[in-house]
Amino acid sequence: MSKEEQFIKNLEGITPKELLEALSEDGRACERELKIISDVMNSEGLPTPVMNVLVHYVFLKDNMKLSRPYLQKIASHWSDANLKTAEEAMTFAKNRHKSRQSYEKTISTPQPPATESKSSSPIEKPFTNYEYKYMEQLYDKYKMNFDVSREIILYGRNVNQGLLLYWFLNAVSSYVYRHNVNTVEDTKNLLKVFHKEHVETFGLEKKTL
């Protein structure tokens, strides 16, 4: 049995809690991370072995951190693929993400419209850890899904020249939450209304949304 086969066998037979204990420096599973895993696992309907592969994968790709929006986004893709076993999940991950660079580009980098130049626009940059943490806060506070919070971050970048201004994002997030939108299209349309009513009104430079 190869090392990879043994690794897959181990992931098939343990719980997420046991995996976290094995990955942590002190041998203890963080309650907050267990809650994140449980929520994502239940919402996406992933079997335990597949969830174990996903958790290990995210830890490796995100510097041993477990961010809810980051995990939720990938879990959604894996759920759509209807993966049932750890082996299927490992194969899927390898085939879909050939390298760390291609993985980050797919998951973390906003794709510009086809008519735009792939230059150094602020909205084209990969999400930072601070932005991921902010999206996680939006989930904890509003149960806001990743796609909606992602649009809020991109909108904030566009208006503020790539800067992460919490006071501005807080105002936008509260506005979006009050209007109860859940899709990317609805969020973009609502942000256009917000921009017209609350940004252009105060004489800020008009941005193309």
Image (spheres, rainbow, N blue to C red):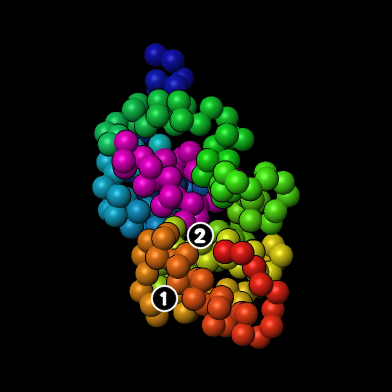
Task: Give SS at disc 2.
Answer: helix
The residue indicated by pointer 1 is: 177
Instruction: Kindly tell me whether residue 141 is visible in this rendering.
Output: no
Q: Are marks 2 and 1 in contact (CB under 8 Å)?
A: no
Total labels drawn? 2
Q: Position of residue 64 (x, y in %)?
A: 56, 46
- 35 left or right, relative to 165: left
Q: Nearer the viewer, residue 153 or 58?
A: 153
| Residue under the image location 39 percent in, 14 percent down | 1
Q: Position of residue 4 (x, y in %)?
A: 44, 21
Q: Position of residue 67 (x, y in %)?
A: 50, 55
Q: Main secondary structure of the magenta part?
A: helix
Q: Nearer the viewer, residue 78 or 204?
A: 204
| Residue under the image location 35 percent in, 74 percent down | 180
Q: Residue furthest bottom?
A: 202
| Residue under the image location 47 percent in, 79 percent down | 174
Crowd around label 2: few <14 · some 14–19 · many ≥20 (10 Å): many
- 153 left or right, relative to 15: right
| Residue under the image location 31 percent in, 41 percent down | 80
The residue indicated by pointer 2 is: 150
* Distance between the alpha carbons at the discs numbered 2 and 1: 14 Å
Task: Give SS at disc 1.
Answer: helix
Mark 2 and mark 1 lie on one chain; the one further toward the N terminus is 2
Q: Which residues are magenta?
A: 54-81
| Above/below status of 16 relative to 196 | above
Q: Nearer the viewer, residue 132 or 196?
A: 196
Q: Nearer the viewer, residue 45 or 115?
A: 115
Crowd around label 1: few <14 · some 14–19 · many ≥20 (10 Å): some
Q: Residue furthest top?
A: 1
- 176 left or right, relative to 133: left
| Above/below status of 94 relative to 34 | above
